Image (cartoon, rainbow, N blue to C red):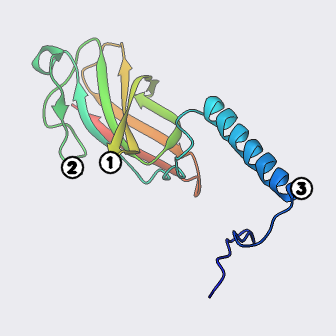
Amino acid sequence: MKQLRLSNGFSPAKKTTSNSRARIRTSAMIAAFAFVVYASVFPGLLYAGAAPPLTSMVVVAVASPAYKGGTQWDYIPANALTTTNDHGGDWICVAVLETGYGTAQNAAFSNTTMTLYRSDPVPATGVTTGFIRYYSLNKTFTSGRFTNQAKSMNSPWNTISTGLNVK
């Protein structure tokens, strides 16, 4: 009959001394304590894998008072270089879809820095795969160019940028 042996070398059939049982209990208690401390210090990070690198960035929508009174988003078609509708007024908001995890976002409209006012995670099968970032600027305009740049939070630490002409 083959004897069952666990990966740590412990065999249920092997006689253990009180010292070895005490070491096993102590190791188990230390591991349980470390788990509880880690879970309280880093809630939600226990089962997370590596964050995906930043792989793409695209402008998905623009809003301004000149487009439907500023009450709706003007959705931008894929690969568009310019908005199809006219924009203007005393403010502008732009929504950007980032695939992966980016940091050091830098958005501008006609060379004026915009404010990141909201960031929503984009989940896929329960895991965040990117973010929709919302930028705003309170400044009178009739047209201009939106630019955005971000750096990946992890390897390969690449920098990605996008832009859109707003008419």
Q: Secondary structure at mark 1?
A: strand
Could you tell me if the residues under marks 3 and 2 are in contact, i.e. CB atoms within 8 Å? no
Residue pictured at 63% horizontal, 29% vertical = 40
Question: Along the line of sight, which residue is nearer the eye, 33 or 76?
Answer: 33
Which numbered disc flags the more N-terminal residue, 1 or 3? Answer: 3
Residue pictured at 50% horizontal, 53% vertical = 53
Residue 112, quarter of picture:
top left
Circle 2 sits on which residue? 78
The amino acid sitting under disc 3 is: Asn
Which numbered disc flags the more N-terminal residue, 1 or 2? Answer: 2
Residue pictured at 47% horizontal, 41% vertical = 149
Circle 1 sits on which residue? 124
Q: Secondary structure at mark 3?
A: helix
Q: Is residue 149 above or below residue 20?
A: above
**Whole-number angstrom distance, CA of label 1 to CA of label 3:** 49 Å
Question: Along the line of sight, which residue is nearer the eye, 133 or 127?
Answer: 127
Q: Is residue 132 above or below residue 114?
A: below
